[in-house]
């Protein structure tokens, strides 16, 4: 009885082992099939017709570009594209042809300053202002040329000039109360304010006489009476009036063509 049970147990065990081996084989086959499915799905799913196993799936092609829009009415069909090549002449650093008409010689460049035209000088006319007498102060002081310097080439005039200087520096022929000259009609040559006198002693050209005479009188009046004196204001007024008369006379001559 024990042997029969042992034989049955051994038979059952062998049957169980065989069944386990078969189940293991079945499980292995199933796992292999699953692995094959997962491999085929990871490589792109189902193979297309004509596709070999393991071959990469072809990438989809991008859609074709749309055709260019048709040109509008009156518009050129083809636009000129900019050239990548440098313009001829600029490649070597040379300046290309200038656009527009060429400049003429002597034509002023843009931004250059034009020489300013010299303004016409004002017309000046000298005239002695009555009641002044500043020129009769013969001792002028250190700011003016000395008689020896003025009459260096005229010793006779130098001796006469010195003889006319009074103790106070004024001319002995000058009347201070009336501010007039007692020998005006017969006064010496150097006392006359005239173009030839200025040319003889100071080398002043005749065309510069009026300006130099006015300048000399201004200096004398400032020295004798001061810069804020009534004598200076009166002299300036006389010069302005005489200058305006001369300027008006010249303008009238231009209108008449003379």
Image: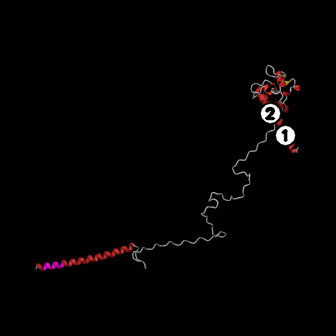
Q: Are marks 1 and 2 in contact (CB under 8 Å)?
A: no
Query: Pointer 1: what residue?
Result: 248
x then y, percent, for residue 239:
81, 34
Horizontal side of residue 181 vs 34, given as left or right: right
Depth check: 51 or 164 in front?
Answer: 164
Res 114 label:
none
Query: Pointer 2: what residue?
Result: 212
Q: How packed is label 2: few (under 14 Cα within 10 Å), some, or many (20 or more)?
A: some
x then y, percent, for residue 191:
84, 27
| Magenta residue span | 4-12
Residue at (15, 79) in percent of width and height: 8
Badge 1 or badge 2: first in the primary sequence: 2
SS under mark 1: helix
x then y, percent, for residue 68:
59, 71
Quarter of the view holding residue 148: top right
Position of residue 251 relative to residue 81, above or below, is above
């Amino acid at each position: 009885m024990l042997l029969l049970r042992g034989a049955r147990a051994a038979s059952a065990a062998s049957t169980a082992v065989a069944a386990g081996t078969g189940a293991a084989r079945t499980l292995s086959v199933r796992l292999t099939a699953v692995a094959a499915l997962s491999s085929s799905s990871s490589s792109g799913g189902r193979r297309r017709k004509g596709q070999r196993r393991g071959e990469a799936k072809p990438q989809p092609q991008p859609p074709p570009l749309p055709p260019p829009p048709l040109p509008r009415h009156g518009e050129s069909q083809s636009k000129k594209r900019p050239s990548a090549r440098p313009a001829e002449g600029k490649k070597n650093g040379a300046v290309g042809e200038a656009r527009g008409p060429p400049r003429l010689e002597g034509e002023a460049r843009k931004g250059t300053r034009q020489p300013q035209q010299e303004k016409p000088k004002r017309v000046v006319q000298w005239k002695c202002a009555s009641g002044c007498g500043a020129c009769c102060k013969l001792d002028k002081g250190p700011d003016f040329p000395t008689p020896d310097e003025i009459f260096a080439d005229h010793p006779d005039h130098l001796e006469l000039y010195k003889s006319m200087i009074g103790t106070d520096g004024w001319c002995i022929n000058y009347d201070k109360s009336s501010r007039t000259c007692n020998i005006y009609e017969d006064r010496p040559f150097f006392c006359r304010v005239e173009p030839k006198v200025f040319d003889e002693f100071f080398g002043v050209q005749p065309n510069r006489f009026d300006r130099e005479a006015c300048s000399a009188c201004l200096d004398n009046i400032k020295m004798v009476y001061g810069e804020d004196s009534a004598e200076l204001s009166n002299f300036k007024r006389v010069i302005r009036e005489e200058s305006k008369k001369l300027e008006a006379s010249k303008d009238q001559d231009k209108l008449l063509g003379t």
